[in-house]
Image: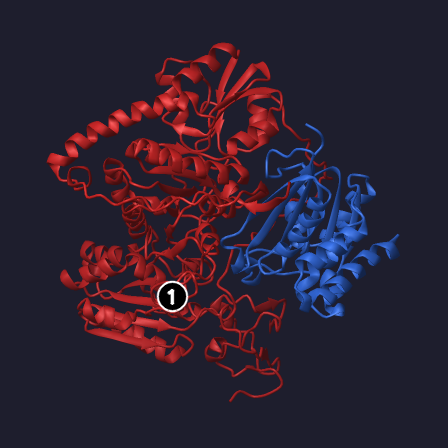
Amino acid sequence: MTKTTSILMGGVGGQGIVLASKLLAHVIQAHGKELKISEIHGMAQRGGSVLTYIRYGDEVASPIIEVGQADIILASEKLEAWRWLPYLRQGGIMICSTQEIKPMPVITGAQKYPEKILEKLQELAAAGKLGALYAINALAVAKHCGEPKAANVALLGLLAHCLEFPLQSYLEALEAVVPEKYLEVNKNTFLLGYQTLMRQQ
Amino acid sequence: MERKLMSGNEAIARGAYEAGVRFAAAYPGTPSTEVLEFAATYDEIHAQWAPNEKVALEEGIGAALAGSRALVAMKHVGLNVAADPLMTASYVGVNAGLVVVVADDPGMHSSQNEQDSRQYARFAKVPLIEPADSQEAKDFLKLAYEISEKFDTPVILRSSTRISHAQSLVILAGRHEVPIRPYEKNIAKRVMMPAFARPRHVAVEERLQKLAQYAEDTPLNMIEWRDTKIGVICAGISYQQVREALPEASILKLGLSYPLPQQLIREFAEVVEELYVVEELDPFFEEQIKAMGIKVRGKELFPMTGEIHPNLIAEKILGRPLAEKLEVPAWEEEPVPTRPPVLCPGCPHRSVFYVLKKLKLLVSGDIGCYTLGALPPLDAMDSVICMGASISAGLGYEKGNPELKGKIVSVIGDSTFFHSGLTGLMDVVYNQGSTLTIILDNRITAMTGHQDNPGTGYTLKGEPTVALEIGPICKALGVKRVREVDPYDLPALEAAIKEEVAAPEPSVIIARRACALLDKSPKTALNIDPEKCKVCNSCMRLGCPAIVKTEDKVTIDAALCVGCGVCVQVCKFNAIVKAGGEND
């Protein structure tokens, strides 16, 4: 079997991971690739961790991604980036929002929100363990564009730099998937996310 | 050729449409719920929510006997509820085809157990079909109807979370119209009393023999010859995981996985050097293959619990992992906090559990969002077993330990009450119990994603219908003490619970308020006045995700708060106010 690309999206229930994965699926499908998307929902709406696996290539067997297998992780919250980090392969890319959403055990004081997650990720990147680390405040980007719920679309803008598909395909996906009413704000959020990386480089 | 990205559940519904199915029924349950939601989008299919899985299957049996191809869907534990009609439907057979779709949940992503529903196929002596992706989910379902009609039997199509909730590309076909078959009365075949059932059991055994023969030749079962050093027998999602882990291995892929194709298995076993079975949960294939006298390795390598992923398959069979772990520096070990699901901000269930904990009552719980009332900081639940068990187990608590009398509260949601709470409540009255039953009536089946139920006034197709009233039902069951409370009104709620739990007879409180996620009205977030807040943590005991404590102060996250006002009633210092002003 030829190489399959594995992208893991992690976030918190209600953050809009589903839209981001739908958009990416549209892009992949437009380029004639095989793909599988696996979602765990059910109790996700109640603020739990949300996890989506996207795998594509000429042939895709398993719909899941295991420890050490993700080529890219897209995490819409810092703790979720930390939680799923072991799933990244050597030299994989971490895309992460710097937003913090405290889980209930942290809110009640039973557990502690880990410190210095970004610093540790930067340390990994500096040591050459990561292919790249892109961390932005996706919520701020989305808010700036007018729709805080579109934070994941800003991260998708970063992801667009890491995959083989042209920018135009993402814009077409937005047009096909997002309702007219929210299209403009989602497009702006996506492009601002995309440009953030150009500025960083 | 155009292909559509579909989840397994959507593909099953599409398969039903293409197969000419006219009737579909289900009770929602993760991971099976979307089968009926998608089926309902086709005008040609009469799709409906049943109050429980037993009713759904019985309706499906009736529809199939009447002459329409019928589909019934449920999660694995739903098949326990529907097991009674399944066992005898096997004897009765069908007229038009009948398929029972059951979605298992290995790994328990959203379930109370991880039973292996394949056992039901052997138990009921009906054929079992297992697709491995969305395309197969659609195509195999269509074949399932042919098998059902050819062999005069209900058929089980078994999915699992990774089939039902994984999306892959599907080639669509048109609908094959299957006319309603003529109805003919046949007492000896369909009225299952002993004299008629005895010959039907003989017919069932003969049918199983014929199905075993069919299993040898059906395209559902096939050998993929590759390197013959390693041969694996597998079905469903395990096929994909084996392909991922062992791309060189030969595979006997079972699509019709009960009864087993013994000849095909022998043929495969003779050629391959090492034979393995990879199957999640029970050694269902393995035990049958071993009983055939064939040497095969399965559960000595793989766990009986949870999902079996490619990495484990590679490790156990090839002796090496598929992927290298990311090397990280020797950072100080710091546990990663879990992110368990929580009751939403403004959830009307929260205050009920807050009061139950405060009053130190024994809470017999049930299945739904409100099961989360068992988690910290609410901790207000003593047991959860299955749909409807709250009320009946509550009565058992009372009869089993006299010291608990007067402290027992059974908590059940509206949809769960309709599902299987009525008979339990009837028994509390009949056997003169004194438990309090709180019906958390949030006007919807919330946990599975807001499905209608007999109390909402709408059908699955969105048409208006009769809305059953819970209060009069309880009264009709013989409960004299029935009252309604708004769970946002904390003092009234607490007073009602105190009074009713102490009553020496059965009592019901209907805590009625719509699910917070359904209330789309504009929200005004609350605010904590730092001047007045003494950081006493009282509001923290509600377990509301919108109330956040930092080192030395408590704040409200305005993005999450819906202004339900329950915390306002908990605060002794009047510190919680509407944003920008005083409370009314």
Q: Is residue B462 left or right of residue A91?
A: left
Residue B75's spot in the image, x, y percent?
A: 40, 46
Residue pointed to by mark 1: B357
The residue shown at (73%, 60%) is A138
Q: Is residue B511 left or right of residue B405?
A: right
The residue shown at (37%, 42%) is B100
- State whether residue B217 is above or below residue B439: above
Q: Residue furthest left?
A: B195
Q: Colour of chain B?
A: red
Residue B84's spot in the image, x, y percent?
A: 25, 43
The residue shown at (51%, 10%) is B271
Residue B307's spot in the image, x, y percent?
A: 50, 36
Q: Residues within 10 Å of mark 1 (few under 14, many from 20)?
A: some
From the rendered image, report the letter of the chain displayed in blue.
Answer: A
- State whether residue B253 is above or below residue B408: above
- State whether residue B203 is above or below residue B378: above
Total numbered circles: 1
State whether residue B396 appears in this view.
yes
Front residue (pair A14, B51): B51
Front residue (pair B178, B459): B178
* Colouring method of the image: by chain
State whether residue B283 appears in this view.
no
Residue A140, quarter of picture:
bottom right
Residue B460's spot in the image, x, y percent?
A: 41, 60
* Helix, strand or loop at mark 1: helix
Front residue (pair A113, A54): A54
The chain holding disc 1 is B
Q: Is residue B247 left or right of residue B349?
A: right
Q: Is residue B500 left or right of residue B414?
A: left
The residue shown at (55%, 23%) is B316
Q: Amino acid at mark 1?
A: Lys
Picture quarter with the N terminus of chain B:
top right
